[in-house]
Image (cartoon, helix red, strand yellow):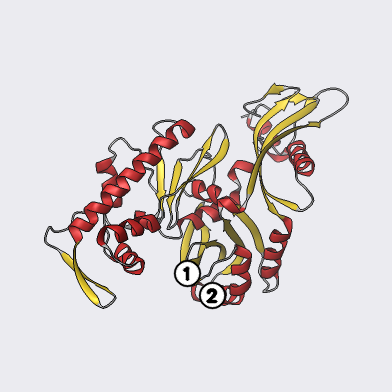
Amino acid sequence: MKGICALGLESDCLRSLFACVQNNRFVPFSEASFPSFSGDIRDVFSSRIDLIDKEIRFREKKHSFVLENIFCNLPADCAKVMIVEDVWPLTPGKKRKLTAKDIADAKAHVENVFLDWNQSCLHNIVLEYYVDDVLCPSLNPVPEGRKLKIKSQLVYIDRKFHAECSSLFENIGRKFSGFVYGPLSDISLNLPLRGKTSCPLTLNLTRDRTLCSGIAGGRVKNIFFDFGEKELEEILSQKFLFSPLVCREIFQRHVTFGAAGAHKEVVIKDGSSYVNVSVSSLNSFLQEKVASALEDIFRELAPVFGEGKEISFLGRMTLAKGFFAFLNTRFPDLAVASTEFRSLSASLLGCIKYGTCRYLESVPLTRTDWFSRIMRIYKEYF
């Protein structure tokens, strides 16, 4: 069996997910995490590369597969984005049909024109095609013309950073297949292997903040919100006068979005003292804070992405008992997208899917080979 791996850095650890392709679906079969520290991805990889290699070998032996590709889920604020457009000549003479090579050449042209030599392009998503200055919403049927103008969304990083990360994996004999922009990973989670390219919005509720990713006007957009587990822990600390460490333990072990018995209590040790805390009061208090924060977020998303968009939720908070029932109760008109894989590593499955298929970067031209043409002509006789 051939496997694919994705790595992603969170606030407190480096996560890994292993998956394979079965029946045109990406199937995750193993995940792991490694202790991390403050620093960028390059620092973490450099200090953990031997541990990563050891873990990969262990997983290969345990699950009887050979790892072919390693992708890295790149946080949104680690890359830069620009919208560019330029013209690529097709022919100086008479008109001819557009080809996949013309589009590839035009994309390479805009990268060469707008990116410096020390910048590496991760994604080149064509937003608009113009053939002889006429906008082509679709390239089927294939248009004819003398020149092609494209408008692209470029996602890029420092070339040295990219090369150094790649060389770390080469040194352990592994193929590094590149970075995937975090928002693309999130929105790709609910996409199938082939076909559909539309996707719901994604709200990734991480420890430090919430990242909303989606497609608006054909462009990949992301918005950060200062809301996450850390903020809720600080609110708990102010409300119940607990230390930050105790609040984090409470949040991870006792917080749910379901109903708790009115008289159920937990005993919390904070320093040298013990305190009884009502689970019902604790959860009710946090549910109000979460509902208020989500309401503010939904209000800000509407002008950017439109009303009534389907939303997919990711993050540790969404794994708490009763979270989706809570959403249904508090926001009955909210369209919640079903997610096939609920895990702390869910974004990494999206990373594998987009890194492998590149949905938004594939050439939208119908290719017909000579064998298919002959078979079509042959069928006309019968």
Disc 1 crowd rating (10 Å Cα; few below 14, some 14-19, many 20+) is some
Residue 62 or residue 366, whichever sits in front = 62
Residue at 25% from the left image edge and 61% from the top image edge: 240
In the structure shown, which secondary structural element does the residue marked by tag 1 occupy?
A: strand
The mark found on residue 340 in the picture is none
SS under mark 2: helix
Task: Specify the quadrant that holds the C terminus.
Answer: top right
Q: Position of residue 121 (x, y in %)?
A: 70, 49
For disc 1, the marked residue is 32
State how many labels appear. 2
Task: List the residue tagged with mark 2.
Answer: 55
Whole-Å distance between the Cαs marked 2 and 1?
A: 8 Å
Against 77, residue 99 (above or below) is above
Q: Is residue 114 left or right of residue 127?
A: right
Rendered view: 50 above or below 339: below
Residue at x-position 35% and y-position 44%: 294
Is residue 252 shown above or below 270? above
Quadrant for the N terminus in the image? bottom right
Q: Farthest residue to the right: give it.
A: 93
Query: Is there a contact, CB below 8 Å, between mark 2 and mark 1?
Result: yes
First along the sequence among labels 2 and 1: 1
Residue situated in front as seen by the camera: 288 or 371: 288
Give the image location of residue 230, x and y in percent.
39, 58
Quadrant of residue 66 within the rendered picture: bottom right
Disc 2 residue crowd, few under 14, some 14–19, many 20+, Cα 10 Å: some
Amino acid bearing label 2: Glu
Seen at 62% across and 56% down, the residue is: 179
Residue 28 lies, in percent from the top left, at 47, 61
Give x and y (percent) for residue 88. 79, 33
